[in-house]
Amino acid sequence: MNESPKALWDECLALVKRNVSEQQYSTWFQPIVCESYDEATRTLMLQVQSHMIVEYLEGNFADLLRKVFQRVFRGKIVLKYRVLAVAHPETAVEYTADESYVRREQPLTKQANKAPTVFDAARNSQFDSYLNPRQTFNNYIEGTSNKLPRTVGLSIAEHPSNVTFNPLFVFGPSGCGKTHLINAIGVRTKQLYPQRRVLYISARLFQVQYTDSVRNRTTNDFINFYQSIDMLIVDDVQEWLTATSTRETFFHIFNHLFRTGKQIILACDRPPVELVGMNERLITRFSCGLIAEIEKPNVQLCVDILHSKMKRDGLSIPEDVVRFIAETANGSVRDLEGAINGLLAYSVVYNTEIDIRLAERVVKRAVKSDDNPLTIDDIVGAVCDRFGISADDLNGQSRRREFVVPRQVAMYMAQKFTRMPAARIGKLVGGRDHSTVIHSCHNVEKRLSADSEFATLLDEIEKSFKLKS
């Protein structure tokens, strides 16, 4: 094959372009750079700007890419991605597509809903742990809220024969990192002891499997399979509060594993004593090992988690945006992930820089909040509607009174309804400095005390905020 790697990649792009929309092509494929092609190992290295692009390509276009490469390179190739760190281009993370990103959940799910049998227990070479390989201790950031369960979990993974902490019962609110931790324990155990039979399963899927075994009269095989596990990890055990038969069956499985020194790890959204309706004898077994609480991460831990994700994915996000997300995420790791993914998606699709204005828009949609906080864009939009001007006029440099007054009102309301400092407000409203914001707020307050019509107008704007929320 005498063609250059770039020529081959251009040929691939031409085929891709004929099979996707123009927007899909310009967003996901056009920015990719063909870095190299090793004909000896048949390895193609593609350079991309973010981890999210890799996930999107492998999740949505894996089959298309495979067919294109088969045609252009006349056979199978090994596809690798190099994710460049935007802030530090000299550093990069490499991924092999087939190993890291092709999700196996879809084909496995078809079998997962079926009750496992004694024959599955005998086939160790085909045994699947159902662990998420990306949820590891390496990216599970330690903080005061998770120090105990993380330390104990790592000890269990490195010394699974030591049953001091058996069972390990981890509890905490949704989004605090329970699932990540129990997956990390299983992944680390399999790395150190590959022959051990480690199984992660949700309580709901366990219940589905059990129901399937009852329907097919294979309950004994179902129990025998679970009794063959060396480390059983069950997530969301609160799902069993109304599943009496499932609980009874798990009770017998638990007893067998416990007596034979097998490790049991359980995750729940509440401590055992609050599992009202659960069998008392099952609650006492949940409580006989170690009960470890994971609290919601504080702001500093949220910042550390965001920095870790940015480093891993090669992202460059301004520090004020990182802090804003951490302070707004309500202590939820899932909300942090959602906010970052949303920012990155907006940035890639609309080719815009990640700044505090974009963060406000995205975080408002990604993060659950009881008070549904206003953003600068909300305030500017409402003020412009009331005064009959455009956002460009409000943010512009004109000193005409019909633009200056709305501008000052927007700054005043931003100061009143958001937690932003004056410097940030000024930056978002036409690029002014903090002294301009302070001066504007002073002028508005002075006029409010003397002009009843002006006060009524501002009340109407504030009411429009409440209607929107």
Image (spheres, grey):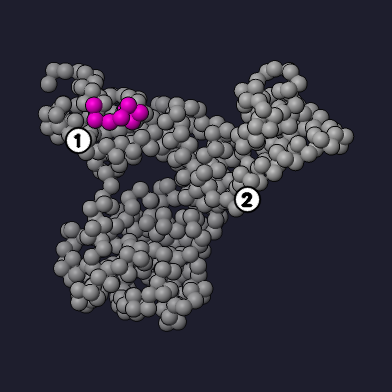
Q: Which quarter of the picture shows residue 14?
A: top left
The residue beneath circle 2 is 371
Q: Residues within 10 Å of mark 2 (few under 14, many from 20)?
A: few
Which residue is more in the foreground, 219 or 408?
408
Look at the image and tell me in which quarter the N terminus lies: top left
Q: Is residue 325 above or below residue 212?
A: above
Mark 1 residue crowding within 10 angstroms, few (<14) / some (14–19) / many (20+): some
- Residue located at (63% from left, 42% from top): 374
- Residue 220 position (above or below residue 140): below
Q: Position of residue 205 (x, y in %)?
A: 32, 64
- Disc 2 secondary structure class: loop
Name the residue nearer the viewer: 406 or 467.
467
Residue 249 drawn at (x, y percent): 31, 77
Q: Can residue 23 be found in the magenta stretch?
A: yes
Q: Is residue 110 above or below residue 301?
A: below
The answer to whether residue 2 is left or right of residue 464 is: left
148 sits left or right of 469 in the view: left
For discs 2 and 1, the disc positioned in front in the rendered view:
2
Residue 363 drawn at (x, y percent): 54, 42
The residue singled out by tag 1 in the image is: 66
Say which residue appears at 27% left-offset and 68% top-offset.
Answer: 209
Of the residues under marks 2 and 1, which one precedes in the sequence?
1
Start-end of magenta stretch: 18-25
Residue 44 can be seen in this image: yes
Number of numbered discs visible in the structure rendering: 2
Task: Kindly identify the amino acid type of the residue bearing the numbered disc 2.
Answer: Asp
Q: Residue furthest bottom?
A: 281
